[in-house]
Image (cartoon, coloured by chain):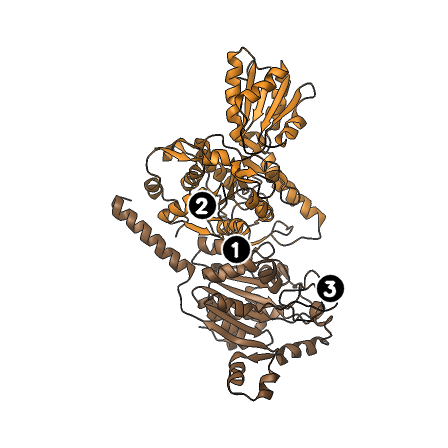
Chain colours: A orange, B brown
Amino acid sequence: MTNERDPVRIRRVLGNKVQFIQGDMAVAYGGLLAGCSFFGGYPITPASEVAEGMARLLPRVKGTFIQMEDEIAGIASTIGAAWGGAKSMTATSGPGFSLMMENYGYAIMTETPCVIANVQRTGPSTGQPTLGAQGDMMQVRWGSHGDMEAIALCPSTVQECLDMTIECFNLAEKYRHPVCLMTDGEIGHLREKVVIPDEDEMELFERVLATIDKDKFIPFSESQTRDSKVPDFPTFGSGYHTYVTGLTHNDKGFPATDKQPDHERLILRLISKITDDREKLTSVEEIELDDAEVAFVSFGASARPCESAVWEARKKGMKVGMLRLKTVWPFPRDVVTQLSKKVKKIIVVEMNLGQIYHVVKEFAVKDCEVILAPKVGGDMHLPHELMEYLEVSN
Amino acid sequence: MSNMKDMTGEQIRKKYLRDGMLPTIFCNGCGHGLSIDYVLWAIEELELDIDKVSFASGIGCSSRIPGYMNADGLHTTHGRALAFATGLKAALPENDVIVFTGDGDCTGIGGNHFIHAARRNIDMTVILLNNYIYGMTGGQLAPTAPKNSISTTSPYGNIEHAFNISELAVALGAAYVARWPVSYPYQPIKSIKEGIQKKGFSLIELMSPCPTAFGRRNKLGKIDALWDWYDNNAILVEDYDRIMNFGSEEEKAGIQGKYKIGVFQNLEKPGFIAEYAKLVNRVTAADDAKFGGDL
């Protein structure tokens, strides 16, 4: 059992460079490639294949897989493993994601790097376990109590499940934050071609470990060694004697539960360490936007029929494009504002009854009309349905 | 190995406690502070490197203890300490993981994690401070509360049956299970030492008086009287078994309702970490055989 990343074993275990696999398995592959050495999870449709993949893969690279007793324990063990020096992850779907919310907040408050893959299904409650949805996009942003920022990525392809899982680990390590891969049952169970990046085709951001004198180290403040609001990480067992608590704490990590300035300073740093880098860490894809008069804004699975609709519309001579949000949180607000200045109309396409629509509306200029193309119930939007929104527009 | 006579309690506290966090939050007459001493004595006597000891806890009075230890401490969410500690131990198997928890934290909200950590036989030592009440939140009914006891949420008396935590751990096959009142100084230290040295899951349940939230409402008297109540209502498990096997009817009647104390289970069985390491060795050896040794 080791937290050391072993590229030779990882390559052996993953096998051929080009494969035809499920999105969920690609998440597991991405975790392995990123150097994940701990997975704690609980079975749930449609995310179980991530755990099954990790159960097969991790022991072969000397990592640890534990099937925990529930999703609360899944994320708890994942956070505990991070403090023990592991890159760690868990995976779940709606009901499990709901159960994780308290400890998700704990990871934010304690600045614990880890990754949570949420293979979304419809809800509320048990909903439609085998069918995809995008109904947890606000939950990932606001689902735990209190003020916080979120980092959430949405893959639209199986390849992106792999690539973005690696990116989630990089962001988790860079910002010391629980990063969510918000995939869904459609992408999770979709089989597509993936190309496994070679070692020199990937970039890994490694955890910045505490190195300064133990008596000078301040565990919960700006870094003392770099220009960063993210403190260096004092792995348990390395002699720093760090006290980690979900209580409001001062920069030494000691409880400061009755002091307003301590709380404000802490929370503002936890939020601004992410929002300061909004432009750097958000990523979008622009399709046919140069001369577009109408733009779809979408993400994840629902961006696929959107893209088909864009090509269909272009064939008909309509000036339509698409902005695909690869990062949904922090919200790429400037990109959306700029887009809204260029186009007359934005159609937000999502597999829910309107979540990211409200955020797009918030950051679009008033002259730009923003409408919603919702769909719930486990069916994806069909390109011709989206064409109807365009035809109404014209 | 150092001898207990070599150091005073004050010296040992100075060595291991974090100045900036004292004084503790504990009320007058609370038993929790003693458990700190007992764990520190055990660490000192075992000559553990404190850098290689990780503490974890949930929420409640007992769960504040890792904050006082000048060591790594993970103060987690309510009831979840054992789940956090499971991941921590897996990622850091060479460290000793010691969990402080309470009866509400561990067997109320955290009951599921408790039974699975014991079943999994994950290598850690759990110091469970059982005060039969939710102390920090002001005295609500705990799952361990005796029948008819008064709490703010059982103002007319508790009609439910009490959880016997140690018996549950025995049934789950925990490698080491002991229960002692905190008023007994030596036995808890010995059990904590045995627990830390044990491969697998160890539970040391310490009966800890809570004068503020439990004793006062249940009219158990002032602090001294409350501590006496714990002592008078405990019986060594060996004595209990002897009386039940060979005692008179009068003796048998006299011990009903008393808390059994002592070491209830002490098994030699491989812990989760050893079992997992075996699994890893097996599958990586198979890979090495298949792919050759060209690592």
x and y percent of residue A63 in the render? Answer: 40, 49
Name above or below for residue B256 compared with residue B32: below
Disc nearest the viewer among 1 and 2: 2
Residue at image point 62% right, 21% down: A346
Q: Nearer the viewer, residue B241 or A167?
A: B241
Indicate which disc residue A171 carries.
none
* Residue reaching furthest to the top: A317
Disc nearest the viewer among 1 and 3: 3
Q: Nearer the viewer, residue A294 or A332?
A: A294
- Give amino acid for label 3: Thr
Q: Which residue is mark 1?
A: B83
For the residues marked 2 and 3, what is the alpha-carbon distance in whole angstroms?
43 Å
Indicate which disc residue A51 carries.
2
Indicate which disc residue B152 carries.
3
- Give amino acid for label 2: Ala
Q: Secondary structure at mark 1?
A: helix
